[in-house]
Image (cartoon, rainbow, N blue to C red):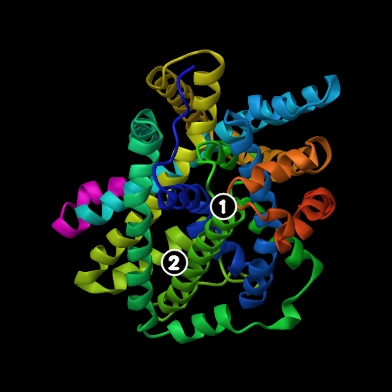
Amino acid sequence: MASREQFATKTGFVFAAAGSAVGLGNVWGFPTITAANGGAAFVLVYLVLAFCLAYPALMAELVIGRYARSNAVTALQKLSRGTYSRWFANLTGYGGVVTVSLILGFYSIIAGWMLAYLLGALTDLVGLLTAEKWLTGSSKPRDMAFMLIFMLATTIIVTQGISKGIERWSLRLMPALIAILVLLIIYVVFQQGSTEGLRVYLFPDFSQLSPALVLNAMGQAFFSMSLGVGGMLIYGSYLSDDANLPQMGAIVTLVDVGIAFLAGLLIIPAVYVAQTFGAEIFDANGVLLSGPDMFFRILPVLFDSMGAVGPVVAMAFFALMTIAAITSSIAMLEPAVSLATETRAWSRRRATWLIGGLISVLSLVIIARMDVLFDFILALTTKYSQPLLGMMFCIFLGWIWNRNQVLAELRKGQPDMEHSLFWKIWPSYVKWVCPVLIFGAFVQKLLIE
């Protein structure tokens, strides 16, 4: 077997791993779930739990990945000690690959919407109103066309490999994403109405705290890091031995949480700015609108109110959404590609085009039966499969893998690891606390939804 490709730089890994985590779940999902869960009180709890839950679970995947230097299935098989643990490894590894492929199936549809709205803003700017109406309208032909365009871009990047594809594009796209986000924030916070949005987002009302809010924040912290499906494990397998894993994991977590926070700092004030121009931002129960309603009902009012500058701001916003989508989609495609190239001896090009094509077919089927399949697959993967898989990864590291081997792997990048505060806390924490917290969030979702 050829030597395993690695990230050329630590910065490349950070941007690629952060890009995997930073997607529509951050730029779209975090602000909308914040809007539905009490604003700043939710943000505060989320920030705490991101480091209490997501970071330890992220470290489990990174350590396993670099130790095994392989896809998720093979990596977990290497840690297995007998028949039962090997069966558990196959269930977790293959489950993660199937789950992340299903997620990409519906994710590419949403990303296609963002791409269509981006081109819609461009056609509006140059006066092609018929094209703009089709691009921003809802139709199966539009959804299919832009899903395929998005999947084509994702496939081309992954075909190029780690350093020349995923790393190179992450190094370009992530700084662009951050720059666009900051510029949009600066613009929005100086508009009339933004002050109320900033108050809701930045000043906690602790009367909003509840067990449901805490568990929702826990779930968002976990899901926003793309954990449980093997993507971070794969990225860890491409890290060099001298990389300090706790440090790398902390930086990735900080970037992910930071961009989620900035996204909220843009979206929540923007919603209140839109209210000053006549947008209805509350539902019949007085709750701030969230989800697709926030993006496709409220924000167009804001863009239309800006006059000539509106299409430019809309272009910047949907460019932000498209970039966020593709940095995640390339990480979603990589686990299945890695499995195929390492277990079936396929070339990267063959594996990427075949798997990308199969996922595109899945997306076309979802679009054809959107009313039935979209919500079903969304719930199956993010509500049921992903949290259980994340718990399984923690169980593997805490209960199946030999503790001395874990320490030896961590010492490659930090020789005095056994004397660090991280080592004194993390192994027991990921063994006992993380599985209980993840399982608690899972049960809570089943009970209240």
Res 244 label: 1
> At label 1, which amino acid type do we have?
Asn
At which x and y percent is residue 163? 37, 38
At which x and y percent is residue 180? 33, 64
Q: Which residue is mark 2?
A: 298
Q: CA distance from mark 2 to mark 1?
A: 44 Å
**Looking at the rendering, which quadrant does residue 357 occupy?**
top left
Which stretch appears magenta? 124-140
Label 1 crowd bin: few (<14), some (14–19), many (20+), radius 10 Å: some
Circles 2, 1 touching at the beta carbon (< 8 Å): no
* In this picture, residue 137 sits left or right of residue 381: left
**Is residue 9 or residue 198 the one in the foreground?**
9
**Looking at the rendering, which quadrant does residue 350 occupy?**
top left
Residue at the image point whose x is 65% and y is 58% from the top: 221
Q: Residue furthest left?
A: 126
Q: Nearer the viewer, mark 2 or mark 1?
A: 1
Please say whether residue 132 is one of the residues in the magenta stretch: yes
* In this picture, residue 280 sits left or right of residue 300: right
**Numbered disc 2: secondary structure:** helix
* In this picture, residue 118 sits left or right of residue 198: left
